[in-house]
Amino acid sequence: MTLDNSSAPCDFVLFGTKGDLARRKLLPSLYQLEKAELMHAETTILGVARDDISLQEYVALVKENIEQFSGETLCTETWERFSAKLDYVCVDMKNAESYSVFAEHVDVSRTMVCYFATPPSIFGDICRGLKAANVIDKSMRVVLEKPIGHDLASSKVINDQVAEFFDESQIYRIDHYLGKETVLNLIALRFANSIFATNWDHNSIDHVQISVAESVGIEGRWGYFDTAGQMRDMVQNHLLQILTLIAMEPPTTLDADSIRGEKLKVLKALRPINSTNINQKSVRGQYIGGFVKGKEVPGYLDEPDANPRSETETFVALNVDIDNWRWAGVPFYLRTGKRLPNKTSEVVIYFKRQPHNLFEDSFAQLPPNKLTIRLQPDEGVEVTVMNKVPGLTGTSGMDLQKSRLNLSFSEAFQDDRIADAYEKLLLEVMLGNQALFVSRDEVEYAWKWVDGIIEAWKHTNEPPEPYQAGTWGPVASIALLARENRAWYESRIGRK
Ligand SMILES: NC(=O)C1=CN([C@@H]2O[C@H](COP(=O)(O)OP(=O)(O)OC[C@H]3O[C@@H](n4cnc5c(N)ncnc54)[C@H](OP(=O)(O)O)[C@@H]3O)[C@@H](O)[C@H]2O)C=CC1
Ligand SMILES: O=C1O[C@H](COP(=O)(O)O)[C@@H](O)[C@H](O)[C@H]1O
């Protein structure tokens, strides 16, 4: 897809351009959009930071970032076009007066897209600075990075600060999982295939498992992570977003209001987990030293800068009920953790077993069909089916085996590069489409539910359960499903 020349150019303003997110993800993604000719020729990119450097120095820095993080050799032609778009301004984002230079660098007659790649604590300051510089108008869009707050109350403060200056239709809240190719494909899989669309409820589905496993530890982010924990860092946003896409009713159209409206209904229907059911419904863990992919790694409390008495969780498993017609009696099991055996995100839908087993000679109990959606890595979709083993032997000639129908994206779409999530999301902001961004209501309902769990954990007064780095979390996580006669699926990724 190449952007039609009639689509308006924009001034893309990157606050926090020298930060980790901008360097590792945003600038390389903008470069990829340029390479794919998806950015308007007249679009400009204005980096904002507090270092007083020249434009020449900034351009050299961006080049270095892209070479380091894009994972490919710089294309000279693309770089020439891209570097010509760059501009830089030094602003102390907390000081509204320092924004006076800003107006010289943007053209207020064009759409301005402001990406706040800074700590959320200064989002309000940035809005005030933009106002002082007199550059805010109705066509402006602002992109907010996660986490939006630390709980419901603090998220309201941040959202209110931004809402003082911008309408909800101008605010794009990022959850980068919504830009992942395979997460987007959940919508296609569910609503473009009648085989799934008509079998997507409590009549056909036994339970759902969503796992987002990471092999990394804290990677120098202890200060941030210890105040968040895996619940705020991963469940409140990414896992709940995946859950809503799996569980939502069909949206009327693919527009932002329809999709976000349906996701919101799911968040509203989540059964609270509180002090009455916390032990049956949740497990939290913290890794101790161990081996990940054969390499010895320290425990959470032995990471650099660690507080050795921290009780922050690095692993969460939950048994979630959705109290609505479609999902009555269908548990959604969620798990996510740091320092697990490998980096794997998968959704597994377990269908109900056949009501009667004709094949007792092959299987005492027929295994259920399973739909596995591999979000990352080895992106793909797999269905397990029971199949007759070809041959003349077996009872009535019927020996069965479990077989896999496997769609591997890397094999099926060999010529297509899988774009980074941020490329997709940046493109959507420039196009003015909010469908892949999280609404204020979604953020707040997600916090409300998560706050209840964190509150209940506090009341139990129990520390997180230790698990060895390189394992699938505490033993209690196995018990969470075993109590209901189920087991976590074993990912094939990393075992090939
Ligand atoms: N890094 C990541 O992978 C992810 C980050 N995020 C979110 O993205 C946002 C940015 O994160 P990250 O890039 O890691 O953070 P960094 O701390 O690396 O970068 C933040 C940027 O904000 C700038 N900044 C902070 N205060 C001021 C100020 N008063 N005036 C001017 N500039 C200021 C910093 O400037 P200076 O360089 O001068 O210090 C820096 O460039 C955060 O909200 C984070 O939660 C979300 C998901 C992943
Ligand atoms: O937002 C975050 O996500 C990453 C995991 O993202 P992925 O795209 O690599 O799966 C996580 O490591 C980080 O702690 C969290 O802040």
Image (tube, rainbow, N blue to C red):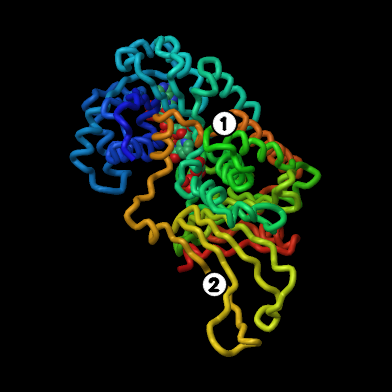
- The quadrant of the image that shows the N terminus is top left
Residue 344, horizontal then vertical, whole percent: 50, 56
The image quarter in which residue 110 lies: top left
Q: From this viewpoint, which residue is outermost toward the bottom?
A: 393
Which one is in front, 190 or 264?
190
- The quadrant of the image that shows the C terminus is bottom left
In the image, taking residue 111 as reference, residue 382 lies left or right, namely right
Judged from the image, the secondary structure of the residue bearing numbered disc 1 is helix
Identify which residue is drawn at 69% across, 36% down.
268
Residue 57, horizontal then vertical, whole percent: 23, 28
For marks 2 and 1, give the CA distance: 40 Å
Q: Is residue 394 above or below residue 206?
A: below
Q: Determine whether the beta carbon of the residue marked 1 sits less than 8 angstroms from the nearest atom of ligand 1.
A: no
Q: Determine whether the beta carbon of the residue marked 2 sits less than 8 angstroms from the nearest atom of ligand 2.
A: no
Identify which residue is drawn at 22% across, 33% down.
81
Which one is in front, 338 or 374?
374
The residue carrying pointer 2 sits among few (fewer than 14), some (14 to 19) or many (20 or more) residues within 10 Å by Cα, namely: some
Q: Which mark is residue 257?
A: 1
Judged from the image, the secondary structure of the residue bearing numbered disc 2 is strand
Residue 250, horizontal then vertical, whole percent: 61, 43
In the image, taking residue 56 as reference, residue 192 lies left or right, namely right
Residue 455, horizontal then vertical, whole percent: 72, 38
Q: What residue type is labelled 1?
A: Asp
Q: Which amino acid does label 2 sit on?
A: Ser
- Disc nearer the start of the sequence (2/1): 1
Residue pointed to by mark 2: 403
The image quarter in which residue 272 lies: top right
The residue carrying pointer 1 sits among few (fewer than 14), some (14 to 19) or many (20 or more) residues within 10 Å by Cα, namely: some
